[in-house]
Every structure is written in C-alpha cells, then in structure tokens.
Image (cartoon, rainbow, N blue to C red):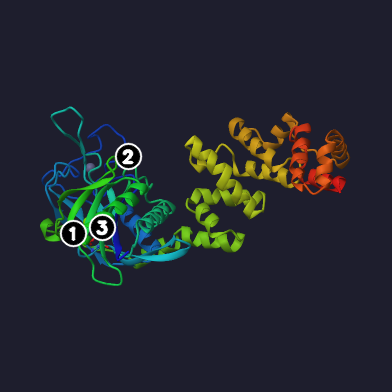
Amino acid sequence: MPFEAVIGLEVHAQLKTKTKIFCSCSTGFGAPPNTHVCPVCLGMPGVLPVLNKKVVEFALRMALATGCSIAGVSRFARKNYFYPDLPKGYQISQYELPIAEHGFVDVAVNGGIRRIGITRIHMEEDAGKLVHDPGQPVSRVDFNRTGVPLIEIVSEPDIRSPEEAGAYLRQLRSVVRYLEICDGNLEEGSFRCDANVSIRPRGTQALGTRTELKNLNSFKHVEKALQYEIGRQQELLADGGQVIQQTRLWDADKNQTFAMRGKEQAHDYRYFPDPDLLPLEIDAQWTERIRRELPELPAAKKKRFMDAYALPAYDAGLLTSERELADYYEACLGFFPHPKIVSNWVMGALLGLLHTQGKSIDQSPVSAEGLAQLLQLVEDGVISGKMAKSVFEEMAATGKPAGKIVAEKGLVQISDGQALEAVVEKILADHPEEVVAYRNGKTKLLGFFVGQAMKVTRGKANPKLINEILKQKLE
Ligand code: ADP
Ligand code: MG
Ligand code: ZN
C-alpha cells in the first residue's frame, strides 16, 4: 500500500463528581429533564461560576497517570458559538493554557508496545442535550447535562491504524476507570471520541489534510469508521482528487461517513480568557499528594502479573483490563496459589458466565473464594476437570459451595485403583475384537476404551488412572 494512515483522537471523559463544574447542581444521570439546573448552569445574566475543586483533582489524576507535565498556572477560556443546547452562548473550556501537556500512553498492539503521545488534557463543561422526538414538529432541550465536568484528552497524530486507535481507546478507558474519575461508558456517552484522520505517502513526514469523524459511540464504530474513511481518502487521492478538511458523521446503519460541515478553525470560536474565573494556580504539594495516592495503573499491574505469576502477556492484559477483575483474580490466588489454572478459569468459565448474564465482576454469582474451593477439589483429585465445569455452572445457578454440590450429586470421582481395574477388565472382556485390533497396532482405540469406561462409571472415573490401567492391561 503506497499510503499510510495518520490518526489523532480527541476523547471527552465525563468526570464522576457529585456536582457540576461551576455550580452545585447534581451530575446525576437519568433525572427528569431540567431538574438539575440553576441560574449558573442556565447562564442567567449576572451569575458567577465557582470552580469545583474535585474536577481539578480528577484532571490532575489523569494528567499524572499519563506522564503529563502539570501547568503551575492554567486558565479557563470562553469558546463562543451558538447552539440551542448552550444557554450561555459560550462553553467554558481551556485553550492556550491547559492544565496538562506532553504525556503519553503505552498501548499493546500486535505483540508489541506503541507509545502514543498526549498533546494536552484540559477541563471544560458539557453542553445540554437536544431531544428530537420522531414525528414532533419541535425539538426540546434538557439542560441537566449543562455544566457537567469533562476532561478532553487530545492525542498526538501518532496512531497508524484503526486497530491501534481501538487499542489506545481501550487503554485510556481502562486508565480512567482505574482512577475512578469516569465510568467509561461509550454507549451512554460518558466517554466520547472524535477521530481525526488523514493519509500520506508512506515514508513521508508532512501531514495530509484531515477529516474529523463524529458520532462514534462504540469501539467497533471507531474502528469501522476509520477503516471506511481511510479507504475513501485513498480512492480520492488515487483518482487525482483532494481531501477536503471537514467534519463527517459516521452512519452505523449505512457503514459510511457523511460530510456534516466544513471543519471550523480555532479563530471561528473567538476564544478569550474567561474574566469571571481567576487563573488557576496549582499547589505543587497538592500535586505530589495526588501522585502518591495514585493506584497501581493497568500497565504496571500487567507487568507485575507477568513477572510475579509468570502469566502470558495476553492473560495479564485481560486480567488487568479492569481493576475489579484483577482484584478478583488475586483474591482467588490467595486461596488457591496456581496462577495459570486460576487465569484459565477466570478468563474462560467465569468471564463467559458473566458475559451471558450481562453482569460485571462485582456481581459475579461465584465468589473468588468459591472458585478457589472448586479448583482445590480438582487439584486434590476429588473431581475431574470436566465435572468441575458442571459444578461451576451449578454454583452459579444455586449459590451453593462446590463441596456441597459434589457431595449432594455423588459426583466424587472414582480414584480407587481396584474398582477401576474391575471396570477395565469387564470392558476388555466385552470387546475382544477391539482388544485384538489394538494389540495389532490400532492404538487409536484407546480413546474408545476410555469412552466406555466413562460411560460405565457415568463420567466419574479418574481419567488419568483409567488411561494408565488401560495401557497396562492392553500391553
Ligand atoms: P481541533 O480539532 O480542535 O482543531 P487540533 O488541531 O488540536 O484540534 O487537532 C485535534 C486532533 O487532530 C489531535 O488529536 C491531532 O493529533 C489530530 N490531527 C491534527 N492534524 C492531523 C492530521 N493532519 N491528520 C490526522 N490527525 C491530525
Ligand atoms: Mg476537534
Ligand atoms: Zn447549576
């Protein structure tokens, strides 16, 4: 391919503060329209905004977690535009002096690590929400979201493929969730992404003309929209045409992007410092305290899981993608210290179960200790791995502990050598032709004999022992 893609993402993360950024209205989601409003967030004349300290603290957490430098003094600015969901006629944001700049996120892609630069992180307020009821001649507006705090995280144009964009976004989402500053919900819009993309001849450095893609409300949509847009730009250039700088909307039903408007320029917004808000001075001691209190972050936890538990990168990455999942895993290990066995069960049976039930790990019907007890029964040879799968399902359905289920169902595996020998002898006596065939070299028949033994014992024979006895008797 003669072209390479150049992608930069702008992510808006809604902060989980109790109150809005410049007033004391609630940020609660799902309340009746226009009940979380006051003169400040409605933009009445004469009111004054007062900055919420928690917003600054959350922005600092993210800035420190992504290796940004923190500005000792930053400023709020007015971004002026007219839209019915913006009652003041301007959005309070940060422009020339954002709170943080020059960070990075390390992202695992294609078995390697790619470092994606973060240009800046700034704080701003959200706009309201327009409600367009189908069949109604009017649109309505809900101002509950007006003034809800956001951070915007702007990446450098360092991303080279839709897949990398997806991996970067997942990583960023994982970080904001670890930091407990944002719930990271793309569908509900608390974590939103605009994607900027251009293409250029491979091996060149100058940036091509970009388009900005909006309306991307899942990771899949981000990847598909970028894929489509890269293809569209390539065709344009290959036909001797030109890419026009514009904002385009992703249409998930048609799988296409459509031109929405010409891309606005910064000067269109007539930015200027907000005279109602003082310059924001950040106390270095406060920053240091926040830094010390940061939790172990996903990348560090992943590395520790690989080093301490000898887990493959894939397992470690998946288990540390959510803090609660990593906690569950380590809690289970505390009771049953076999890292890879626990990893297989958590990634397989447990995540499978949670997925089908649409539950998160904190709602898991099987506790970490409960899972450990089940695995101990397998380890002790009381039940087979196969039985364990059905016991696990029973645990999830009934909440009973593994030991109780095993006892009630009489599932205990037969590991008594003499009993199994009798079983094997009977099977061999019943199938003389197969025995001869086996001894003449058709050793694949071993599976047949094992199957017979399982049938006779209704799955309870210890498979390892049965194999050993069969081989010995068939010699
Ligand atoms: P805005 O979209 O508000 O004008 P910027 O100019 O700062 O803001 O750019 C926003 C995003 O677009 C950044 O993530 C940046 O990396 C990315 N970007 C800028 N130029 C290009 C380009 N030519 N191709 C791809 N991405 C770009
Ligand atoms: Mg933009
Ligand atoms: Zn308010």
What's the amino acid at mark 1? Val
Q: Dot 3: few (<14), some (14–19), or many (≥20) neighbours within 10 Å?
A: many
- Residue sitting at x 66%, y 53%: 338
Task: For the residues labelled 3 and 1, say whether their Cβ atoms are less than 8 Å apart.
Answer: no
- Residue sitting at x 76%, y 40%: 450
Q: Which mark is residue 28?
A: 2
Residue underneath mark 3? 196
Q: Dot 2: few (<14), some (14–19), or many (≥20) neighbours within 10 Å?
A: some
> In the image, is 265 to the left or to the right of 414?
left
Q: Earlier in the sequence, mark 2 or mark 3?
A: 2
Task: For the residues labelled 2 and 3, say whether their Cβ atoms are less than 8 Å apart.
Answer: no
The answer to whether one can see residue 155 in this image is no
Instruction: Say if disc 1 is inside 8 Å of ligand 1.
Output: no
Residue 182 rendering spot, x and y as whole percentages: 37, 49
Query: On the image, which quarter does residue 58 sit in?
Result: bottom left
Return the residue nearer the eye: 191 or 463: 463
| Residue depth check, mark 3 versus mark 1: number of the one nearer the observer | 1
Of the 4 image quadrants, the one containing the N terminus is bottom left
Q: Which mark is residue 243?
A: 1
Q: Earlier in the sequence, mark 2 or mark 1?
A: 2
The answer for how far apart the CA atoms under marks 2 and 3 are is: 31 Å
What's the amino acid at mark 3? Asn
Return the residue nearer the eye: 2 or 101: 2
The answer to whether one can see residue 91 in this image is yes
Residue 471 rendering spot, x and y as whole percentages: 82, 47
- Residue sitting at x 14%, y 56%: 264
Is residue 93 placed above or below 425 in the rendered structure? below
| Residue depth check, mark 2 versus mark 1: number of the one nearer the observer | 1
